[in-house]
Image: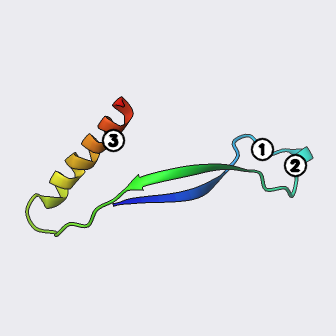
Amino acid sequence: YAGYSTCFRKEAGSHGRDTLGIFRVHQFEKVEQFCVTGPNGNDSWDMHEEMIKNSEEFYKE
């Protein structure tokens, strides 16, 4: 599975007297992989390895 979301983080270095009371944020888009596995055996480790392979293949293309 994959999830897509818009995220916000506080801007680095955006503090000081001239920005008092202003919330400055950095907006970015994020895609995350996730899976659901059982607690027994090596299922979760196998899926973890598969997600790493997916990421590596994505960035090679």
**Tag nearer the camera, 3 or 2:** 3
Please tell me which residue is depicted at 84% across the width and 55% down the height of the picture. Answer: 22
The label on residue 14 is 1
Give me the C-alpha separation between circle 3 and circle 2: 39 Å
The amino acid sitting under disc 2 is: Thr
Mark before the other along the chain sequence, 3 or 2: 2
The amino acid sitting under disc 1 is: Ser
Mark before the other along the chain sequence, 1 or 2: 1
Give me the C-alpha separation between circle 3 and circle 1: 33 Å
Judging by the rendered image, the residue that carries numbered circle 2 is: 19
Residue 55 position (above or below residue 61): below
Residue reaching furthest to the left: 41
Please tell me which residue is depicted at 51% across the width and 51% down the height of the picture. Answer: 30
Residue reaching furthest to the top: 60
* Circles 1, 2 touching at the beta carbon (< 8 Å): yes
Give me the C-alpha separation between circle 1 and circle 2: 7 Å
Identify the secondary structure beneath mark 1: loop
Q: Position of residue 57 (x, y in %)?
A: 30, 36
**Tag nearer the camera, 3 or 1:** 3
- Is residue 37 found left or right of 25 in the rendered image? left
Q: Position of residue 54 (x, y in %)?
A: 29, 44
Judging by the rendered image, the residue that carries numbered circle 3 is: 55
Please tell me which residue is depicted at 21% across the width and 46% down the height of the picture. Answer: 49
Q: Quadrant of residue 58?
A: top left
- Is residue 36 found left or right of 61 in the rendered image? left
Q: Residues within 10 Å of mark 3 (few under 14, many from 20)?
A: few
Residue reaching furthest to the right: 18
Q: Residues within 10 Å of mark 1 (few under 14, many from 20)?
A: some
